[in-house]
Image (tube, grey):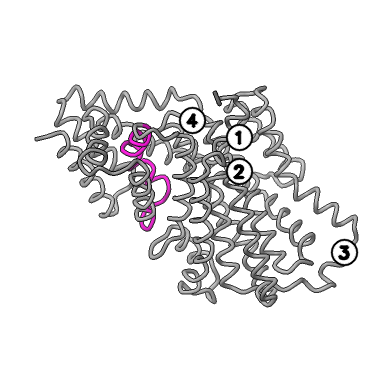
Amino acid sequence: MSYELIATLMFSSMMLMLLTGQRVFGAIGFVAVVASLLLWGDKGGFDLGFAAAMKLMKWYPLLTLPMFIFMGYVLSESKIADDLYKMFHVWMGGLRGGLAIGTIGLMVLISAMNGLSVAGMAIGSTIALPELLKRGYDKRMVTGVIQAGSSLGILVPPSVVLVLYAMIARQPVSQLWLAGIIPGLMMAGLFIGYIAIRCRMNPALGPVLPAEDRDIPRAEKLRLLRAGLLPLGIFFVMMFPFVKGYTSLVESSAIGAIAAFVAAVLKGRMNREVFENSVRNTLGITCMFMWIILAALAFGAVFDGLGAVKAIESLFTETLNLSPWTILILMQLSFILMGTFLDDTAMLVIVAPLYVPLVGELGFDLIWYGILYTITTQIAYMTPPFGYNLFLMRAMAPPEITLRDIYASITPFVMIMVGALALVMVFPGLATWLPDYVYNTTP
């Protein structure tokens, strides 16, 4: 049996197991170990899993995962994130669509606190959505706002997904985070521009708050401003020494976790329940990510041993005579297809052993491609019929918002994200300029 056929059987077996409802790490790891046992015998099979585990345990930057996740949960569970929305409510309520615009700002800051899109979705749907509906905002527009805004969590640093990509692609996490800042803020700006234009054309979509709701003393406004900007201050305290080179990535993540904990204590919101929930959720998500990475490393080792990447490159470039850009676009389309039934982490670990080395062989920058992957994942999150964010929103939204409303709400935002993806593809400097500038990596 040829190596190409073995690689095809491995990939198809993994997809079949996923379709039967098996856990992602179980399906990937099982196929990897069974394939290595059949190919290289008992020694090779057992050594594969052990070597992957040792590689995982020795990867020092992995310590950032529990730190950032803990930081986000502390800020969320202690209700410090609620202060952000109160700040936007007061300061932006006088604009048409101001609360929706403020919700995008809230999502950007939540992303900087947690790095997971599900956190932004949970906070947006529980804090912002009821308030927006009560204030007469169009339900379809605000549903789309929350879904689109929450997707920024996997692009704006400290993105957990980019940490996983860095592990698999063997690229610096710090450069990937910096590469995500400009595209992430650009996308948030495009969302805000769309909301402002729509609400100016049709004020009924996002009415201005009544004067009595906005007429509060300036001292109270300033108090809310200070309280709302606290998470941003924590992010600055964490990231500034890292960007300046005073601390390592792991040290900065620890600073962020400690700063969030101290802020919750000083505000009188840290109690046993908040601490216990934060630690339990952090442990659960961290263990999930570690199992998935372990399985992905084992699967990738088998693929490397088979030379599958070289075979696929030869198929595309020599047999089919496709250009590198055509291959890249086909890869992005496959991500969108997989995103209709898989989450971002599953997509990454399934195709990373195949796609990431292929991208390198085709001559593309892997830092730049990490941002392309992340934006494509955001689009896939909101693509019907089974986009991940669509069903998260359905589970969290009030009964008056139907699945039809949710599907209709995301169309303009998906179009904006496709436009942002095209811009980053055409102008790679949007992703690569900042890391090149900070680390002086340009020749």
- Type of amino acid at the residue the image marks with label 4: Leu
- Above or below, 124 against 437 in this view is below
Answer yes or no: do the residues labelled 2 and 3 have beta carbons within 8 Å? no
The mark lying in front, picked from 3 and 1, is 1
- Distance Cα–Cα, label 4 vs label 2: 24 Å
- Distance Cα–Cα, label 4 vs label 3: 46 Å
Identify the magenta region. 339-360
The mark lying in front, picked from 4 and 2, is 2
Secondary element type, mark 3: loop
In this figure, which residue is indicated by the disc labeled 3?
A: 216
Name the chief secondary structure element in magenta: helix
Q: Earlier in the sequence, mark 2 or mark 3?
A: 2
In this figure, which residue is indicated by the disc labeled 1?
A: 434
Q: Quadrant of the N terminus?
A: top left
In this figure, which residue is indicated by the disc labeled 4?
A: 62
- Type of amino acid at the residue the image marks with label 1: Leu
Secondary element type, mark 2: helix
Q: Earlier in the sequence, mark 4 or mark 1?
A: 4
